[in-house]
Image (cartoon, rainbow, N blue to C red):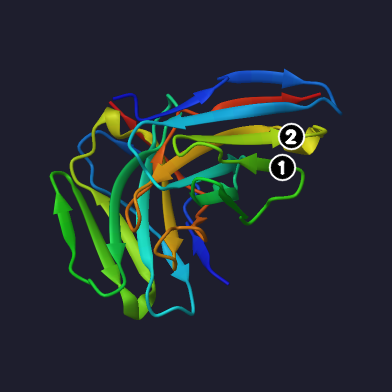
């Protein structure tokens, strides 16, 4: 069975601070896909990144970066120089299926960035 | 390009009533999904479809039915609503092997 754990329920930071959101996953599959989604206060879900299990390179996109470590089954997300607009709930998700029909989401981490 | 749309945005039902949620996508995606989001539990997959005319059960399918008569539409039905089905429902679609795009959600309350 697959499982995603986001141990941080809520995080509060002050603007311009760096913040890391943790994601730990469990799967017996050797091929799988990891995702991060953002859910701002408006409620929609915004796709941030998809990473397959064979690509352990870290990725950077502007102020966002992701650290994938198979050895610790983690896929952590760092926001550098946080901004108020980063305030949202962030979900990590895992799928071992090419068509995502077994997607498992973590419970989410609520990030509040104060001015 | 509207992406993924959901109708209605809000609904209040009484226990035992039925309703259908409509999801439409204009991205020509083969795959469509229905999720429910409950506080502290993330999203859970209810049903999904890998193409027109096909549907399959997800993680929490009990109490729901779905239909995919047209490629662009995916309907979620509740035949006899229960308070435990109070939730926010999200529809999503994807091309094969790619990320899912989500609709804006439907907030359903069953009293």
Q: Secondary structure at mark 1?
A: loop
Q: CA distance from mark 2 to mark 1?
A: 5 Å
Q: What residue do we see at 20% from left, 37% from top?
A: A16
* Parent chain of label 1: B
Neighbourhood count class around disc 2 (C-alpha, 10 Å): few under 14, some 14–19, many 20 upward:
some
Q: Position of residue A74 (x, y in %)?
A: 36, 68
**In the rendered image, the vertical position of residue B32 relative to residue A97, given as above or below:** above
In this rendering, would A18 be left or right of A111? left
Q: What residue do we see at 24% from left, 58% from top?
A: A66
**In the rendered image, the vertical position of residue A19 relative to residue B14, given as above or below:** below
Q: Secondary structure at mark 2?
A: strand
**In the rendered image, the vertical position of residue A114 relative to residue B54, given as above or below:** above
Q: Which residue corresponds to mark 2? A: B78
Q: How many marks?
A: 2
* Parent chain of label 2: B
Q: Which circle's residue, 2 or 1, is located before the other in the chain?
A: 1
In the picture, the quarter occupied by the C terminus of chain B is top right
Q: Which residue corresponds to mark 1? A: B64
| Between B91 and A41, the one nearer to me in the picture | B91
Q: Are marks 2 and 1 on the same chain?
A: yes
| Between A79 and B39, the one nearer to me in the picture | B39
Marks 2/1 in contact by CB < 8 Å: the verdict is yes
| Between A75 and A110, the one nearer to me in the picture | A75
In this rendering, would A33 be left or right of B107? left
Q: Position of residue B41 (x, y in %)?
A: 60, 48
**In the rendered image, the vertical position of residue B96 relative to residue A14, given as above or below:** below
């Amino acid at each position: 069975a697959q499982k995603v754990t986001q141990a941080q329920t809520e995080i509060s930071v002050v603007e311009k601070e760096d913040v890391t959101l943790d994601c730990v996953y469990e799967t017996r599959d050797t091929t799988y896909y990891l995702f991060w989604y953002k859910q701002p206060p408006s409620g929609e879900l915004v796709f941030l990144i998809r990473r397959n299990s064979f690509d352990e390179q870290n990725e950077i996109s502007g102020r966002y970066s992701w650290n994938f470590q198979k050895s610790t089954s983690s896929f952590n997300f760092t926001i550098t120089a946080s901004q108020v607009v980063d305030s949202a709930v962030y979900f990590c998700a895992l799928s071992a299926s090419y068509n995502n029909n077994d997607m498992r989401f973590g419970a989410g981490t609520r990030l509040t960035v104060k001015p | 390009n509207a992406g993924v749309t959901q109708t209605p945005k809000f609904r209040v039902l009484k226990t035992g009533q039925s309703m259908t949620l409509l999801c439409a996508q204009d991205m020509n995606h083969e795959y469509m999904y229905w999720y429910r989001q409950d506080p502290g539990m993330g999203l859970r997959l209810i049903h999904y479809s890998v193409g027109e005319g096909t549907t399959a059960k997800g993680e929490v399918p009990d109490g729901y039915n779905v239909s995919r008569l047209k490629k662009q539409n995916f309907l979620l039905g509740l035949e006899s609503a229960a308070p435990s089905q109070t939730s926010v429902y999200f529809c999503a679609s994807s091309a094969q092997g790619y990320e899912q795009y989500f609709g804006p959600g439907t907030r359903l309350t069953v009293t």
